[in-house]
Image (spheres, grey):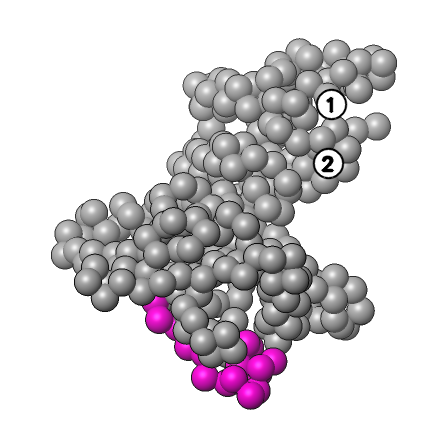
Amino acid sequence: MKNLKKLMTLLMIGSSLLLISCGGGGGGGGSTYGSYTSPSVSAQAFVDALNRVDPQYADSYIVRDEWESERSWVPGEEEWFVIWDAKFGEYKAVSLQYIRSIIYYDYYSNSTSLADEFRAIESDDILDGFYNGDPLGDDYEVVDYDWLTDLYFGRNSGFAYEDEEETTDVALLQGEQEKMAFFKKASAVSFSFNVSIETAMSLVTLGKKVEKMVGNNGEVTNEDQQALVGDLQNLTGVTLEDVAAAAEDSSKKADLINKIADKIGTSADNLEHKILPEVFGLELQ
């Protein structure tokens, strides 16, 4: 019975992780006025929206899309695109993750309100004296084109936005695509649940392990169970015995929550009221 309960808990955790790693999180439709994001907006949709909110400068366009521009392999920095910004008459590099995380207020999720909020943020940056984007170039920045190297160089970050080399090696291309997909999932989890990118990658990896195990004719061996328990302990810093003790003694609950929160790099409140119920499907009484 004990092993069965353990297995059910692990499967529940795994299924929750799979939902997150496949979908991410963030705003959506609806008709109630409030805060929204556009977690699936494309670079092209964003630029089209800029042209709508700036009708007198409605000829901004994409110079290099996110699959054509490589800035860095650091998780969360791998998807950037470069545009000609007609409003300011300059080239600009923009993080796709950043625009998907911008919060704006409207009655529903839409790219026009997103673009309008981006312009408002940009105006605030300029008023603060940051004429080339956010101070470090982490979200967006003005770039200069070097025709000798065919590169765009960020004025704030110093990054070169390179044109990715084409490859005919199908296996290599597939591997790169899988790496990009993994980072995209981890970035979505990191943003949605306010955890470090390292923790997010661990969650996505754990979800993929469970998916593979469950897909093996629905059979999860004792070895699989032990491996998952070990992964969970490494991720949370606590053992199943610690959890059981806290469940039987409410005075140990706060210590347990704080210990896990410190381990995964988040707050105790975020862990208890968002991560545990939404990621793991667990409500602590």
Q: Which quadrant holds the C terminus?
A: top right
Element marked by disc 1? helix
Picture quadrant of residue 278? top right
Please tell me how crowded label 2 is: few (under 14), some (14-19), or many (20+) other residues with Cα within 10 Å.
Answer: some
Pick the residue in front: 145 or 193. 145
Residue at screen point 64% across, 72% down? 116
Residue type, mark 2 in image: Asn
Q: Is residue 51 magenta?
A: yes
x, y (%) of residue 167? 17, 55
Apparent side of residue 168 relative to residue 189 in the rendered image (left or right): left
Q: Disc 2 designates what residue?
A: 270
x, y (%) of residue 182? 42, 44
Q: Is residue 191 magenta?
A: no
x, y (%) of residue 24? 56, 51
Q: Is residue 29 above or below residue 266?
A: below
Q: Disc 1 designates what residue?
A: 257
Of the numbered discs in the image, which one, if any, rests on residue 75? Answer: none
Mark sitting earlier along the chain (1/2): 1
Apparent side of residue 267 relative to residue 101 in the rendered image (left or right): right
Residue type, mark 1 in image: Ile
Pick the residue in front: 161 or 10. 161
Element marked by disc 2? helix
Residue at screen point 80% across, 20% down? 254
Residue 98 visible in the picture: no
Residue at screen point 56% across, 35% down? 196
Q: Is residue 92 above or below residue 174?
A: below
Q: Which segment is the magenta one?
A: 49-64
**Looking at the image, which residue sits at the far left?**
168
